[in-house]
Image (cartoon, rainbow, N blue to C red):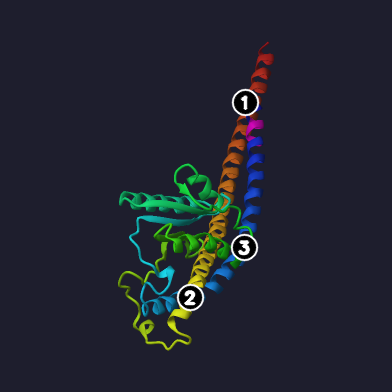
Amino acid sequence: MAALKDIKRKVQAVSKTKQITKAMNMVAASKFKNSQVRMENFRPYATRFMDVLNSLALRVESDTHPLLAVRDPNRIRAICMTSDRGLCGGFNTNLIKLTERFIKEKTGEGKDVSLIPVGRKGRDYFRKKASIINDRADVFGKFDISLAVKISDDIIPPFVKGDYDELYIIYNEFVNVSVQRPVVVRLFPLPSIGKDVDIDPEKRLDYIYEPSDEVLLERLLPMYIHVLIFRALLETSAGENGARMAAMDNATRNCEDLISSLTLKYNKARQAAITAELMDIVGGTEALAKG
């Protein structure tokens, strides 16, 4: 009977776990819907903003604005975005692995790499593994464009002063609930600065800007950083909630399978115990009859 009690206790424990995972799945689904709407509404604006700015940057010299400066990239900084919480499958693991490969590649080239973690998981992982500057944690619960502005304030002045030469951002590009794509994007200098960029002919049109290109860049370049960082935050948030929703859905199904397996095991053990008791009764009856 002790074995039956153990199996029954396991069934009860797994059933409680199933209730938790199902509740977490519902919460993640609700958050995912909101974050997906925000991301999809902002993505076209961010894409077009980048296209216009890259087109504008191609028309001016790199010394027109400090943020266009092209220097020998000996000192590199990278913003690594991860979630603040776990239980979202391989979401954080994939971002961390990509960041590790990026650091290894750049340090292998003799570069000095510093990391700016955004999100608790990345900060905790790289705390003793990399040079960390201006980390931010517990930010994905509720955020708006002001968070992107604060992060920008940490990275723009040091670049202008020449404290580092290149800036990259590592984040999750949301594809769908099942597919999360970690990507690396260069922020400083602009992708169209310092090398030939294959831009669509339509984007190479000779736009007429008012006021001048230089005045526009003065206003748009800081906004460019705000926009890209905010987009990365939205994409990472949507990816985290989508990954957690999928992970909790898988966990709930695994609990159901485990409950079915344990229930079958319990029924077999119970049947075996009943059979053993019947055999004892029959054997005792036969012994009394013979006596």
Residue type of the residue flagged with mark 2: Glu
**Residue 170 point in image, percent of width and height:** 45, 58
Residue type of the residue flagged with mark 3: Phe
Q: Secondary structure at mark 3?
A: loop
Residue 183 seen = no
**Residue 273 point in image, percent of width and height:** 63, 28
Gap between marks 3 and 1, in whole Å?
64 Å
The numbered mark at residue 218 is 2
For the residue pair 165 and 84, the one nearer the viewer reads as: 165
Within the image, what quadrant is residue 28 found in?
Answer: bottom right
**Residue 181 point in image, percent of width and height:** 44, 60
**252 sits left or right of 185 in the view:** right
Q: Is residue 206 above or below residue 240?
A: below
Dot placed on the residue nearer the N-terminal end, 3 or 1: 3
Report the residue marked by disc 1: 276
- Tell me what residue is drawn at x 45 percent, y 64 percent: 160
Residue type of the residue flagged with mark 1: Ala
Report the residue marked by disc 3: 143
Within the image, what quadrant is residue 166 found in?
Answer: bottom left
Gap between marks 3 and 2, in whole Å?
26 Å
